[in-house]
Amino acid sequence: MADDYENMTVAELKELLKEQGLPVSGKKADLIERLAGAAEQDDAPVEEVEASSDDAEEDDFFEEDDDWDDDEGEVHVAKQKPVLDEATQEALALRAAQKKKTPSFRRTEWFRYKRLSRSGWRAPHGMDNKQRRNFKYRGSLVRVGHGKVASARGLHPSGFREVMVHNLNDLESIDPETQAARIGRTVGGRKRENIHARADELGIRILNRRRNV
């Protein structure tokens, strides 16, 4: 029975827990353990079930009370993995290796002014600009040679291709095997909660999922 639970998604496990009136909080391992325990109680004699009912209520109370302090909250348990071919997996691994050797591109004199250190890259200008003239003690320039693998360009580090989502209808066109959703910053809390619930039903991964929703 435990092996059957392992093959199920977190959304499916939560549906089973809701049907049995059990808490749905915690990690996937906790959900499977809770379902397995309920199945053992159903097979156990009636006397043993009545004796352990009080202990189960106490365990559920402390289990729910500890979830707020868990760094990997309920919203992070269902991290779907993309279906990738070998060529894409090799491209992602090569891109990760290349990224370690890529310099950090900073603006001219970013060390002199705090406002420049907080801003992004800007191409240097000026006839006497040391960075433009490629002096060794200045930062690196953005060039074609720093580009990454073309086949992995635009992919999330997990391997998914990001799709911007602003409402429930945007989720319907997403392929959960190769694409993941990123909710727009202008989406409100109530609509975001509905998008989370619908994404769990469809098995779609949300890249910028919030814990408090």
Image (spheres, grey):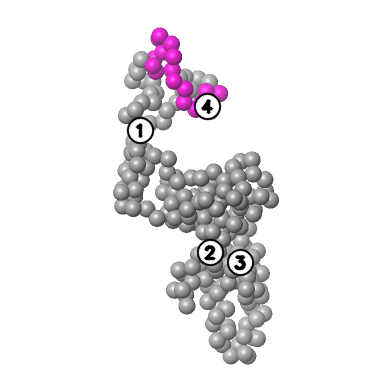
Residue placed under numbered mark 3 in the picture: 24
**Which label sits on residue 184?**
none
User: Residue sitting at 57 percent across and 78 percent down?
Assistant: 38
Q: Is residue 89 left or right of residue 207?
A: left
Question: Are discs 1 and 4 less than 8 Å apart at CB?
Answer: no
Amino acid carrying label 2: it is Val
Q: Of helix, strand and loop, which one carries label 1?
A: loop
| Relative vertical location of residue 159 with respect to residue 47 in this rendering, above or below | above
User: Residue sitting at 54 percent across and 46 percent down?
Assistant: 182
- Disc 2 from disc 1: Cα separation: 38 Å
Residue placed under numbered mark 1 in the picture: 147
**Badge 2 or badge 1: first in the primary sequence:** 2
Amino acid carrying label 3: it is Val
Question: Are discs 1 and 3 less than 8 Å apart at CB?
Answer: no
State the image coordinates of residue 72 (x, y, percent, origin top left).
Answer: 54, 56
| Relative vertical location of residue 54 with respect to residue 93 in this rendering, above or below | below
Residue placed under numbered mark 2 in the picture: 10
Residue placed under numbered mark 4 in the picture: 119
| Relative vertical location of residue 154 with respect to residue 51 in this rendering, above or below | above
- Disc 1 from disc 4: Cα separation: 21 Å
Q: Which residues are magenta?
A: 114-132
Residue 89 visible from this viewpoint:
yes
Name the main secondary structure of what is drawn in magenta.
loop
